[in-house]
Amino acid sequence: MEDLVRTVVREDIRALNAYPVPSAERMIKLDAMENPYALSTALRARLSSTLGELALNRYPSPSASQLKHQLGALMGLNDTPAMVLGNGSDELIQMLALAVAKPGAVILGVEPSFVMFRLIAQLAQVTFVGVPLDPDFSLNGPALLEAIARHRPALTFLAYPNNPTGNCFDAQTVEAVIQASPGLVVVDEAYYPFTTYSFKDRLGHYPNLLLMRTLSKLGLAGVRLGWLCGPVEILAEIDKVRLPYNISVLDQAAAVVMLEHRAELQTQVEAIVQERMLLAASLKALAPVTVFPSAANFLLFRVPRAGQVFDGLRHHGILIKNLSQAHPLLYDCLRVTVGTPDENLAFLDGLSRVLDIQ
Ligand code: PMP
């Protein structure tokens, strides 16, 4: 069997580990930037009656026009913009990488940032160039512009706000990157619900700007739906890479129902933003902890012996994310997703115990 695997599977794929998703059974799960709140009973009832009436013997609607209309409305746009839907924005990243994957092509990003940009580039056999952020996690404008001039990337990814750092980059530097780029620039607004500024008003100003959003952080991580907006000519090409029927009947219908009731999700988002502020203040009050500013639904913090702190928290039944080995700039860094008030208190309590500073 080993021989068979070695013969047929690419060497770089054999060297990879599958994307790690740790078990969170019976744990307080604060590792994956999910919305911690449950839906109201009324919305649950509405969902189940809608899903119960679906014809699952048929392929999903290829145009998904009802869903796209709702997504346009969610973006605050009167006219539904052109968009390509993905099974999560992960799938859109994959479509983009496949669409530009010709010999010698480069995909550019900053690091640390969302790991799938580099991983998917590698899977598509495209060279990935990661320009380091400054130690305070801001963009290094001159280094980025120099890398763009040198590598002439076909595709550049910038997450706004950035994951795992949580900050929003300087918007003028982002625009300078868009202007200087000979290729496509994707501004990944996965965490838009928790911030204020969007590049959506810049769509149409730049022929190479694409905007990527997802429903995952809004409360629908289980639905798997991302969307990409931008010039129709470019979207038409990306659409050729998309597998037919990539968004299931169930996902489309669930997303439409939820978006019709988006006020409920918006209330949850407001609670998360409020809790983020309280959690940041409480974390800052813990002596050896440095908390980084966040415009997202998580906080990055630095604490001495982060690996031990992470293990200690897990021992107390609290799962967060250990990033201390992920990138040199993230030394001793951990990331916690904002949970419900009770979950956040349990996390703070666990952390105080682990740090032994009760
Ligand atoms: N972009 C960023 C910046 C993210 O952090 C994530 C998820 N962690 C995604 C995209 C992917 O989101 P999804 O595939 O759930 O839409």
Image: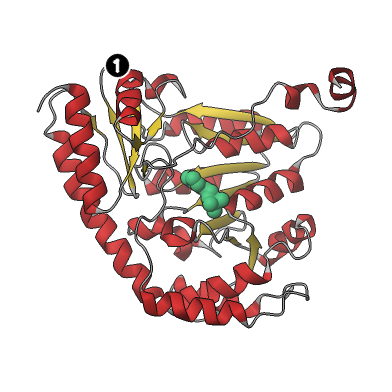
- Decide: is 77 above or below 161: below
For mark 1, give the secondary structure.
Answer: loop
For residue 61, which quarter of the picture? Answer: bottom right
User: Which residue shows up at 46% across the image and 70% down it?
Assistant: 75
Foreground of the two, 199 or 325: 325
Please provide percent x and percent y for residue 159: 47, 45
Q: Residue at x 33, y 39 (%)?
A: 336
Q: Position of residue 187 (x, y in %)?
A: 51, 51
Of the pair 34 and 208, the residue shown nearer to us:
34
Q: Find residue 302 and report its image quarter.
A: top left
Q: Amino acid at mark 1?
A: Arg
State the quadrant of the N terminus: top right
* Residue 77 in sight in this render: no
Examine the rendered structure and indicate whether residue 256 appears above or below residue 182: below
Horizontal side, residue 141 vs residue 271: left or right: right
The one of 155 and 335 positioned closer to us in this rendering:
335
Q: Is residue 291 left or right of residue 216?
A: left
Residue 252 placement: quadrant: bottom right
* Residue under label 1: 305
Instruction: Name above or below for residue 201 compared with residue 56.
Output: above
